[in-house]
Image (cartoon, helix red, strand yellow):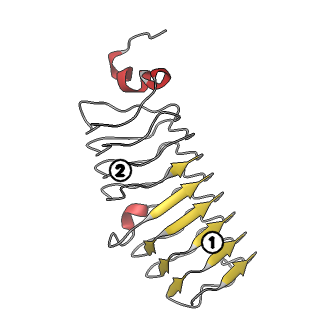
Amino acid sequence: MLDESFTAIDFTQQLLSESEYESCEFKNCTFAQVTLSGITFIDCTFHNCDLSNVDLNNTAFQEVSFVNCKLLGLRFDTCKSFLLELNFDKCTLNYASFFGLKIPKTNFQNSSLLEVDFTESDLRNADFSHCNLTGTLFSNTILEGADFRKAINFNVDPELNYIRSAKFNNDSLIGLLFKYNIIVD
């Protein structure tokens, strides 16, 4: 499919008919618990969609944006990594996994990322502006140039992650010092 728009479709009742979607827009659609295995999305945008618990095994996302979407429990680490490019704005990504993915310059702006796994991911120059990162796991993660200045509730251990040139503000420094159990006023 090329340059198509899909509005208010419940894909739990009507399965996607093609294996590749390019320059398509999905608005107010429901994909919850659907299998998207083997489907390729190129330069697509999802607006106000529910993709919670979707099976992403071998799904390709190339230049795909999610705006105001519900993406609970997604295993992005099972997607095709070739040309993987994602951007999120005002999304709920709680309990998602990005384990081991190379997704530099990804925007996670204005989103909820509760208990997300970024272990061994490459997040160079990622933007976490206005994100809640409660319980999110950063371990052996490349965060060079990542922007945490307006993020809240994150814990990034500088000894376990690569944080050169990452951006933090004074209010967020406690997120770097959490393991020392110190009090910062």
Q: Secondary structure at mark 1?
A: loop
State the image quarter where residue 72 is shown. bottom right
Foreground: 172 or 74? 172
Whichever of callouts 2 and 1 sits on the residue coming sooner in the sequence is 1
Circles 2 and 1: CB distance less than 8 Å? no
Which image quarter holds the N terminus? bottom right
Please tell me whether residue 162 is drawn above or below residue 55 in the rendered image. above
Measuring 49% from the left and 70% from the top, which residue is drawn there?
A: 55
Identify the residue position indicated by label 1 in the image.
31
Please tell me whether residue 174 is drawn above or below residue 100 in the rendered image. above
State the image quarter where residue 132 is shown. top right
Q: Count the marks: how many? A: 2
Q: Secondary structure at mark 2?
A: loop
Measuring 40% from the left and 54% from the top, which residue is drawn there?
A: 105
Image x and y of residue 111, in percent: 58, 47
Please tell me whether residue 94 is drawn above or below residue 46 in the rendered image. above
Please give left or right for residue 9 compared with residue 71 in the image: right
Question: For the residues marked 2 and 1, what is the alpha-carbon distance in whole angstroms?
Answer: 27 Å
**As drawn, which residue projects farthest toward the right?**
8
